[in-house]
Amino acid sequence: MEWCVSMPKVELHAHLNGSIRDSTLLELARGLGEKGVIVFSDVEHVILKNDRSLREVFKLFDLIHILTTDHTTVTRITKEVIEDFASENVVYLELRTTPKKNDSIGMTKRSYLEAVMEGLRAVSTVDVAFPAHNVDAGSPTKSPPVNDMCNGPTRKKIYVRLLLSIDRRESTAAAMETVKLALEMKDLGVVGIDLSGNPVVGEWNTFLPALQFAREHGLYITLHCGEVPNPKEIQAMLDFIPRRIGHACYFEEDDWKKLKSNNIPVEICLTSNIVTASVSSLDVHHFANLYSGKHPLVLCTDDAGVFSTNLSSEYNLAASAFGLGKRELFLLAKNAIEFIFASDGVKQDLRRTFDLASNKMD
Ligand code: 5GP
């Protein structure tokens, strides 16, 4: 396990509000309990529970969003989540989050995202590399900043990029608002759009216009695909040819064919799939088939807080479940660079980081 921690890693599927420390959630819940907003004893065991069905996961997210959705807390959790990934040697993180609107506290999708960006800047334990920002009273300038800036002297460094999530509960107009926000923030570290949220809610056609618009305007798209058996939607999603997909648990033969012929990389979240019983056991997990067929894939956490995992544990799990040695794990982690949504310059820098580390990794 220690070896997996020390290896540099790339995380491409991590939801901000799913990656919060239990200690932070408990502290926030206690605070809201004291204010009489919630009853702490009712939620404590929900936060600390280990096994959760997919349905329970989405109920938990409703609770988490009650605990976290104010600007200060969004900034705090962003900072902590980045620090946690960096502490286990994640060198590139694509963090995804759903911009939220909450009129009662004056939160707009834009102000939510700005609170996230504030969290990036607040990290002090490591250097965070993200595109230089030039926000003037809430309106970003059009001039594209070229270089990643670090918010401190050179120490351990983590690249961070953002994906904005569309929640499947949202309307076409709300999805479009998220995409337009992503486009405005494209020079500030937002590289793509994710479609997520409860997979039994919403219709693919509701989100398609916003996703098409995003792609036409240069944003990369990743989709939660095949988390539940929904063959028509899986086919429609694959026909869209997204840059990556997450999960792929309920694929049938035709779906695998389409995925493979289009060479679409898969974000694999082993613990998440097992805990939610989307896959019955690791013995039958599709990782093995994709890996042996050299299909592009990347190990990810999904929701490190909700599923009590971290990226090092996911690599460790892959090693024990699928018999991968150190060299295979290292190459798996390094190959993930090829599927990131950041620029070629970032890719080159990451390749150098892995090459330097490879000498020390025996
Ligand atoms: P947030 O976007 O609020 O930062 O992160 C939590 C949100 O991510 C959830 O409300 C949900 O929309 C999405 N999410 C997190 N984990 C999963 C997952 O395993 N599957 C799907 N479909 N959505 C998820």
Image (spheres, rainbow, N blue to C red):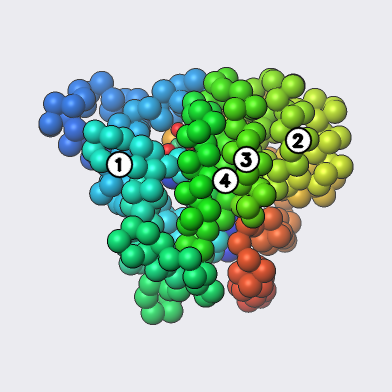
Precedes in sequence: disc 3 or disc 1: 1
Q: Nearer the viewer, mark 2 or mark 1?
A: 1
Mark 4 sits on what residue?
193
Precedes in sequence: disc 4 or disc 2: 4
Q: Residue at x 61, y 69 (%)?
A: 346
Q: Position of residue 257 (x, y in %)?
A: 86, 35
Q: CA distance from mark 2 to mark 3?
A: 13 Å
Q: How many marks?
A: 4
* The one of 233 and 313 positioned closer to us in this rendering: 233
Mark 1 sits on what residue?
107
Whether residue 291 is visible to the viewer of this picture, yes or no, is no
Mark 3 sits on what residue?
211
Q: CA distance from mark 2 to mark 1?
A: 35 Å
Precedes in sequence: disc 2 or disc 3: 3
Question: Vertically, is 76 above or below 357?
Answer: above
Q: Nearer the viewer, mark 2 or mark 3?
A: 3
Mark 2 sits on what residue?
238
Which disc is residue 56 wearing? none
Amino acid marked by disc 2: Leu
Whether residue 214 is visible to the viewer of this picture, yes or no, is yes
Q: Residue at x 34, y 42 (%)?
A: 108
Find numbered disc 2 in the image and state the secondary structure of the residue it sits on: helix
